[in-house]
Amino acid sequence: MLLAWQAASPASRFLCGNHDLSLAKGLGLVESSHRAYYEARIASRSAETLKSYGAKDAAELAEKMPAAHKDFLVNLPWVVEHRAGYVFVHAGLDAAEPAERQLEQLRARDAGIYRPKWLHDTGLAWAVPPDTNKVIVSGHTILRRPVVSDRRILLDTGCGYGGPLTACLLPERRLIQIPA
């Protein structure tokens, strides 16, 4: 569905999240010294993904997944920076580190990092580095209601767990929700 969307709307951008990176590591699509760990988790944590490809395990999934799907996973950016002053990152940025240094690390997409905090750390949900005036937009941390403030937009309302799917129309900051 995302590949079709991207073909129909080439300006669309998709963002890498922790589950995307874990799957890419587990399938050996990106270099990681933690491949065995992530590969072992596919059977228990990715049952719907296995089922959707008609695979019973990670090895079969790697065989059955089309090259276009693998390329999509491998090439997902860890950060999308919009010229209007928005930074989209799965979990957020760390307020204790300079923003530009973090953006450089996100642009580099170092899959060798065991659990990149910007994709995994729920503690980043409310963080805003003091040295940036950009609005940080993310998900990852499930909230009952989305948060839209001057410097932070949090959109994860638990769609994968029965909550609504939430989007935010920018720059209007208009929230759009549909049931799971």
Image (cartoon, rainbow, N blue to C red):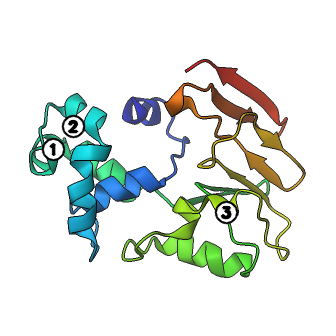
Q: CA distance from mark 3 to mark 1?
A: 32 Å
Circle 3: residue type? Gly
Q: Position of residue 136 (x, y in %)?
A: 74, 57
**Nearest the eye: 36 or 134:** 36
User: Is disc 1 in contact with disc 2, using a CB cutoff of under 8 Å?
Assistant: yes
Which mark is nearer the camera, 3 or 2?
Answer: 3
At horizontal 62% and vertical 25% (from top left) the residue drawn is: 164
Element at label 1: helix
User: Is disc 3 in contact with disc 2, using a CB cutoff of under 8 Å?
Assistant: no
Circle 2: residue type? Leu
Is residue 180 rendered to the left or right of residue 59?
right
Q: Position of residue 118 (x, y in %)?
A: 58, 65
Residue 134 shows in this picture: yes
Q: CA distance from mark 3 to mark 2?
A: 30 Å
Location of the C terminus (image quadrant): top right
Q: Earlier in the sequence, mark 3 or mark 2?
A: 2
Q: Which residue is mark 1?
A: 61
Q: Earlier in the sequence, mark 1 or mark 2?
A: 2
